[in-house]
Amino acid sequence: MGGGSKVGRDKVTNKESPMISQQKWFERKFDFSYPVSRFPGIFQRILGAPARLEELVHSLPQNILTVKPGGAWSIKEHVGHLYDLDALHDARIDDYLSGATTLRPADLNNRRTDDANHNAKPIEEILKQFREARMHFVKRLEPMNEEQLARTAVHPRLNQQMRLVDMATFVAEHDDHHMAAISDLAGRAH
């Protein structure tokens, strides 16, 4: 788990509030022991991600969007990373539908995001790209039936069986992870 407490700004009250450092993504473990019937709520998280992301960044000035604290990703790079990964999520639907036993791997070095130069693009362009990619992903997920959502394949990094509904949860958790990082960066800048 990440480090101890720190102080950040509460987005609602704009007052300082203690926050817990976020656990690193690659340190996360996942328990997928829930029923497929949780899919409608998971689907809503995935569907709502573009609007939530737009709300997080809409009022931030350009100089805040491109700050790279300690060389880490900027807010624009976090947004761009979510866009960059939707192609993988979409391709993994194909893996499930084709009966693959193992899902295609992600680029754990995130070369696509690092090479994309998201900081040079207008935030509106990155948000539009993410919304379009996510709506394509949503249109593919929405008609899935219970049998399809229960199909399994091994997630290569986690080395564990993952149903299609679990992959959707993984995507929603990944979205939330990066939105929390964006919120933290925005809070530190104000």
Image: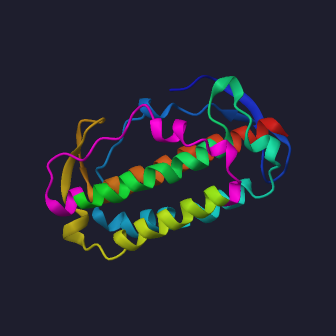
Residue at the spot 62% in from the left edge and 29% down from the top edge: 72
**Coordinates of residue 131 in the picture (x, y in percent):** 55, 65
Name the one closer to the observer, 29 or 181: 181
> In the image, is 155 to the left or to the right of 119?
left
Above or below residue 177? Residue 141 is: below
Measuring 29% from the left and 72% from the top, which residue is drawn there? 144
Residue 54 percent coordinates (x, y): 67, 60
**Quadrant of the rendered image containing residue 146:** bottom left
Q: Where residue 63 appears, x then y in whole percent?
A: 81, 41
Q: Depth check: 60 or 132 in front?
A: 132
> Could you tell me which quadrant the C terminus lies in?
top right
Q: Is residue 3 left or right of residue 122?
A: left
Q: Is residue 138 above or below residue 14?
A: below
Give the residues in magenta.
Answer: 95-124
Please report the residue visible at 80 percent of the width from the left and 51 percent of the height from the top: 60
- Residue 49, given in percent of the width and then of the height, sits at 56, 61
Residue 122 is a magenta residue: yes
Tell how many labels. Answer: 0
